[in-house]
Image (cartoon, grey):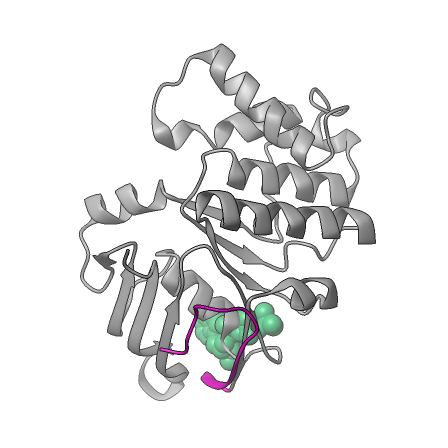
Amino acid sequence: MDDPIVARGLNHWFGSGEARKQALFDIDLTVARGSLTVLMGPSGSGKTTLLTLLGCLRDVQEGSVRLLGNELHGATNATLIALRRRLGFIFQAHNLHESLTARQNVIMGLEVHGKIPAALAEQAASHVLKLVGLGDRLDYLPANLSGGQKQRVAIARALVGNPDVIFADEPTAALDKETGANVVALIKRLGRERGTTTLMVTHDNRILDQADRIVTIEDGRIVSDRNKGAGTDAG
Ligand SMILES: Nc1ncnc2c1ncn2[C@@H]1O[C@H](COP(=O)(O)OP(=O)(O)OP(=O)(O)O)[C@@H](O)[C@H]1O
């Protein structure tokens, strides 16, 4: 099977004219199916820019990104929309709907898949909320949840649609030790059992220990690529 993420000669700029600044330089990266890859590096090094480019949240300006077999450079809107349905995003700003309960927020993660019978959607949402340790908070509103609990709702929402690829930006920052470990264990299990591929920006040591691979970016360039598991290789 094709590698789910293949970037070649990826360059990216922000701004225009005199203010134009290059954020990524000639990035080559191949990510193996089912692996957990961590992106790390100093603030401003380009981690989020790379994550959002690979996750089709930003247009590719120069170079190639093949995501799940589809070229993103010049891709049509229809292709991008279809692809996004196969992705799960966990970002720090959890963007939960304040008027919806935890379970209803997670059900929102299924809506991109079209109409799903309500009972089935509720069952799926309850199941993932239990997996992230919120089985006793299904009907709570975000206002009545802690920061870490809200983050877990956002994680459940990203996972409920069985994404092929998960893109995560510091997903465990607001979590206590045990919950953070549980979330990573869940991501690892999805990788093993379903071949879910995860690319994650983090400095969390608990995750670095568990990662298959650690890619370090500095000043928009990959400066180190450490393969801890088998089967993955630098692009
Ligand atoms: N929308 C933008 N407009 C202009 N410059 C930007 C924009 N987004 C990012 N940059 C610049 O691109 C570079 C890379 O930023 P990026 O957010 O990818 O870094 P990062 O490694 O994710 O940083 P952090 O760890 O602080 O989140 C930085 O110099 C940043 O200032």
Q: Quadrant of the C terminus?
A: bottom left
* Viewer-proximal residue among 76 and 3: 3
In the image, residue 108 above or below residue 179: above
Q: x%, y% of residue 10? A: 31, 77
Q: Is residue 178 left or right of residue 76?
A: right
Dividing the picture into quarters, in which one does residue 153 lie?
Answer: top right
Q: From what the image shows, is residue 119 above or below residue 171? A: above
Q: Residue at x 70, y 19 (%)?
A: 139
| Residue at 75%, 32% in the rendered image | 143
Q: Is residue 135 magenta?
A: no
- Residue at 36% of width from left, 61% of height from top? 58
Q: Residue furthest front?
A: 230
How many labels, in total? 0
Residue 99: tell me if it is visible.
Answer: no
Residue 234 lies within the magenta run: yes
Residue 33 image position (x, y, % from top left): 40, 57
Residue 190, percent across and down? 53, 45
Span shown in magenta: 219-235
Please tell me which residue lies in front, 232 or 25.
232
Q: Can the viewer see residue 58 in this picture? A: yes
**Residue 70 percent location from the top left of the image:** 22, 56
The residue located at (34%, 24%) in the rendering is 114
Quarter occupied by the N terminus? bottom left
Q: Is 194 on the left or on the right of 41, as rendered?
A: left
